[in-house]
Image (cartoon, grey):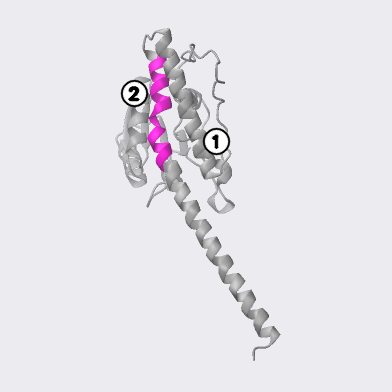
């Protein structure tokens, strides 16, 4: 006959096993939600940039501007849902309230000088979207879809005396990530401004994942306005004024 002590020990082991199984299921659910959030974010990434570009660069009727504002508001609501899926509280500009006057979308702001930009990201959709937006601003854009490719492209340009004015790189990339890209570029050209793109935000980086020394941190996908302002500011900043 099993003693009371044996029965208690058996019960504890069963509870421990059940707890471990629940934790594993939770981890799987978190990974699934993260994947869904990333898919949704990629699907809507170009909507804000395209609507802003149309509003700023095309002559539109009042009705068309209203439609654009509604599309942009819908995209912002989807982005807010993505943030909830990720369990992250990311600061976003507030969407217009229902019924508000949305006919007047923001007017263009002063742009930075024309720049030679190196854009590094493993997401081809984001690459194409940002390249189009930057080229519309008058910048010359070179793109790479891997961290190592970005480092190599920067090195080749540096050796040829055609240094990039600014580098925009994703943080999360396979094999060679944004941290390694930043380190490689800093070793070659400490003064080159670097913008780091991340879909998670600085506040979710743990102590073991210290933010590399960059000039600006932007969420993915960045708004045209915030990207424009960052470029205008950073090309006139001192190289020592960096995050990290």
Q: What element carries label 2?
A: helix
Quadrant containing the N terminus in the rendered view:
bottom right
Q: In which quarter of the image is residue 137?
A: top left
Residue projecting furthest to the bottom: 1
Q: Look at 41% across and 15% down and name the residue there.
A: 55
Q: Is residue 28 above or below residue 173?
A: below
Q: Tell me the crowding category of disc 1: few under 14, some 14 to 19, or many 20 or more residues within 10 angstroms, Cα based.
A: some
Percent position of residue 221, x then y: 44, 33
Name the residue tied to disc 2: 135
Residue 47, magenta (yes or no): yes
Name the residue tied to disc 1: 242
Percent position of residue 73, x then y: 48, 24
Residue nearest the viewer, comparing 91 with 5: 5
Q: Distance between the residues labelled 1 and 2?
A: 26 Å
Q: Tell me the crowding category of disc 2: few under 14, some 14 to 19, or many 20 or more residues within 10 angstroms, Cα based.
A: some
- The range drawn in magenta is 39-56
Q: Is residue 197 above or below residue 179?
A: above
Dot 1 or dot 2, earlier in sequence: 2
Mark 1 or 2, which is nearer the eye?
A: 2
Q: In which quarter of the image is residue 41?
A: top left
């Amino acid at each position: 006959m099993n003693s009371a002590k044996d029965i208690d020990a058996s019960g504890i082991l069963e509870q421990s096993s059940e707890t471990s199984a629940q934790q594993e299921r939770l981890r799987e659910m978190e990974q699934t939600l993260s994947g869904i959030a990333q898919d949704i974010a990629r699907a809507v990434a170009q909507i804000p940039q395209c609507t802003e570009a149309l509003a700023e660069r095309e002559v539109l009727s009042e009705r068309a501007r209203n439609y654009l504002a509604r599309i942009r508001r819908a995209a912002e609501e989807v982005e807010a849902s993505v943030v909830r899926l990720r369990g992250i509280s990311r600061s976003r500009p507030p969407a217009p309230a229902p019924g508000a006057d949305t006919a007047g979308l923001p007017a263009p702001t002063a742009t930075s000088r024309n720049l030679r930009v190196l854009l590094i990201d493993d997401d081809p959709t984001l690459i194409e979207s940002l390249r189009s937006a930057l080229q519309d601003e008058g910048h010359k854009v070179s793109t790479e879809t891997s961290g190592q490719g970005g480092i190599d492209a920067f090195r080749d340009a540096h050796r040829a005396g055609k240094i990039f004015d600014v580098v925009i790189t994703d943080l999360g990339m396979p094999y060679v990530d944004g941290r390694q890209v930043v380190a490689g570029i800093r070793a070659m050209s400490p003064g080159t401004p670097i913008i780091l793109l991340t879909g998670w935000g600085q506040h979710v980086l743990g102590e073991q994942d210290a933010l590399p020394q960059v000039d600006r941190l932007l969420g993915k996908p960045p708004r045209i306005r915030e990207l424009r302002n960052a470029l205008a500011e950073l090309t006139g900043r001192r190289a020592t004024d960096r995050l990290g």
